[in-house]
Image (tube, grey):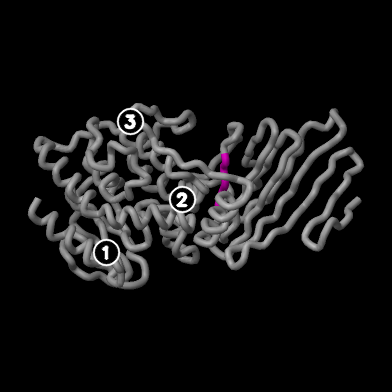
Amino acid sequence: MPSMASKDSAFFAFSEGLSMREEFQRYGDHGSIFMLDFSSLDSKIDAVKIRFLDISSAKWNGLGPRPSHDLKGSIELKQGLQTAAFAIDGRFLLCESSGKRIFSFINGALELSLELPAAVYIGYAKNPMQACQLWHIWTMLYSHPVHWNETSLELEPQEGIGRFKPRDAVGLLGSLSFSGAKPSDFQELNFSIAKDAQGYEDWKIADLMLCQPDIVLPLLFRREIPMNLEVGSNRKRAQNRYAKIRAGLSQYWEFCEKRWNNEGIPAIFHPSILFPDDCDYAKSDNMLFSGSDLVFSPNMASKDEFCSLILPEGQWIHLWTSRIYPSGKVTVHAPFGTPALFYRLESEYAWLFDSIRQRASRL
């Protein structure tokens, strides 16, 4: 039995004793939030189960667009932990409950099992970038505060982050940018990537750290190559070069952090956040954006020192040689300390990136 509570909300009383309030809220040009609030006065009704049919082009699981990262089975979410899942078309999903919250992925559908009282929030935006902004506005300015914290040097990886192959590291970091994750979540993942290094071509993991903004790295990694990584005989020189390049980029790292704070755009993200309609990027797991002006590929899968990637639209300057490349597939030499890293020709930080090139050539 539905009844309208206002022009943007309604109340439903079900014969089984369950009640549901739905509410629709607009947030300017950023998008809208649709809320379903469930409760029951009948003590025998203590949970609700909701099923969302999946769309092949919209992954609800928070692991982004890479098919091989699709989750299967069920996940029990911890109390107080916010977990969102951004789809390529700009939607996100969040659930809250006074008790257990379980996500299940069954036959192309997402199923939520929530103990009552419970609420489900669905965000609608035009694209992933606006979905990030909508999530930021909604969590920071209204009733869902987000607390960002730093990963301590002694902190062990969180339960649930299992061992994985180093070649999956870039794809997992990109996938995390579709999940509404906090900086501490990226820090935890980077901590796990470094911890799980197996001594084979660890320099590629060091190059992965080299290209990431400060805010997504554990404190120690921001100026030092993780000590457990095997990076060759001349470690002192490699550490010095790593520290000076990262320090030289500090002004840009601050810009990336400020944008995340002010707009909700992650400091590091999968290329589909910027280019949701590009099928090549939807399948990509070998490149990332650091802010909107740096794109890089740390060559985790290949066994040699050459790296291939597809540059986005526009013109891009290879950080280490200053050669200008158009959009499309490129292959560059990427030995230790010089990963495939490009900056946007029109970037307001072009002067800074060029100074890094000059400094790196002397190190």
| Residue at the image point whose x is 73% and y is 43% from the top | 50
Q: Amino acid at mark 3?
A: Leu
User: How far separated are the C-alphas under marks 2 and 3?
Assistant: 23 Å
Say which quarter of the image contains residue 100: top right
> Is 285 rendered above or below residue 357?
above
Residue hosting label 3: 153
Image height of 190 relative to 275, above or below: above
Along the viewing direction, whichever of 116 and 164 lies nearer the viewer: 116
Q: Earlier in the sequence, mark 1 or mark 2?
A: 2
Span of residues in magenta = 82-86
Magenta-colored segment: predominant secondary structure: loop
Element type where label 3 sits in the image: loop
Which element type, helix, strand or loop, lies under badge 1?
strand
Indicate the position of residue 64 as horizontal and vertical percent values. Answer: 49, 50
Q: Residue at x 84, y 43 (%)?
A: 19
The tag earlier along the polypeptide, 2 or 3, is 3
Q: What residue is shown at x 63% (from left), y 55% (from top)?
A: 123
